[in-house]
Amino acid sequence: MIATVAAGDHIGVSSISLAEMVYLAEKARIPANALTDLHDAIANPKAVMKHIPLDEDVAMKVMEVPRQDVPDLPDRVIAATALLRGVPVLSRDDRIRSSSIKTIW
């Protein structure tokens, strides 16, 4: 991973993913420290994780993610973020993986 960061490559983490993690931690579906651990990893300039904000460009790109293929709004935002940046989505979500969105996993 160090070579990846040195080359300028990162794993982007959408703002919507952070918000979803708050929700999942509150429901005890993920460990309570998962969000803190991810936030710390994003804050570390030597880490491979990088925060990707939810902005107007991402919001408008959501229109290109068919709702019938990916009905969940957070998943559509994640897919739109990847489309906008021209990168695949790292996801195990069956709806995203079976859509036209390029995925890894």
Image: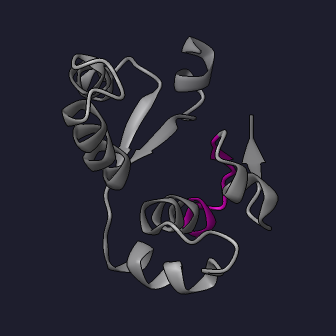
Query: Residue 32, position in %: x, y?
Result: 22, 20
**Vertical placement of 53 versus 4: above or below?**
below
Query: Residue 35, position in %: x, y?
Result: 26, 27
Q: What is the quadrant of the N terminus in the image?
A: top right
Query: Residue 25, position in %: x, y?
Result: 25, 31
Which of these two is toward me, 1 or 88? Answer: 88
* Residue at (30, 21) in percent of width and height: 34
Say if the magenta span includes residue 87: yes
Q: In which quarter of the image is residue 45?
A: top left
* Residue at (50, 58) in percent of width and height: 78
Q: In this view, does 12 lie to the left or right of 91?
A: left
Query: Residue 33, position in %: x, y?
Result: 23, 16
**Vertical placement of 50 versus 74: above or below?**
above
Q: In this view, does 73 lie to the left or right of 56?
A: right
Color theme of the render: one colour
Q: In which quarter of the image is residue 56?
A: bottom left
Q: What is the quadrant of the C terminus in the image?
A: top right
Say if the magenta span includes residue 9: no
**Vertical placement of 60 versus 29: above or below?**
below
Numbered label tally: 0
Which of these two is toward me, 60 or 9? Answer: 60
Q: In this view, does 92 lie to the left or right of 32?
A: right
Q: Give the range drawn in magenta.
A: 82-91
* Residue at (44, 69) in percent of width and height: 73
Which of these two is toward me, 46 or 71? Answer: 71
* Residue at (19, 35) in percent of width and height: 26
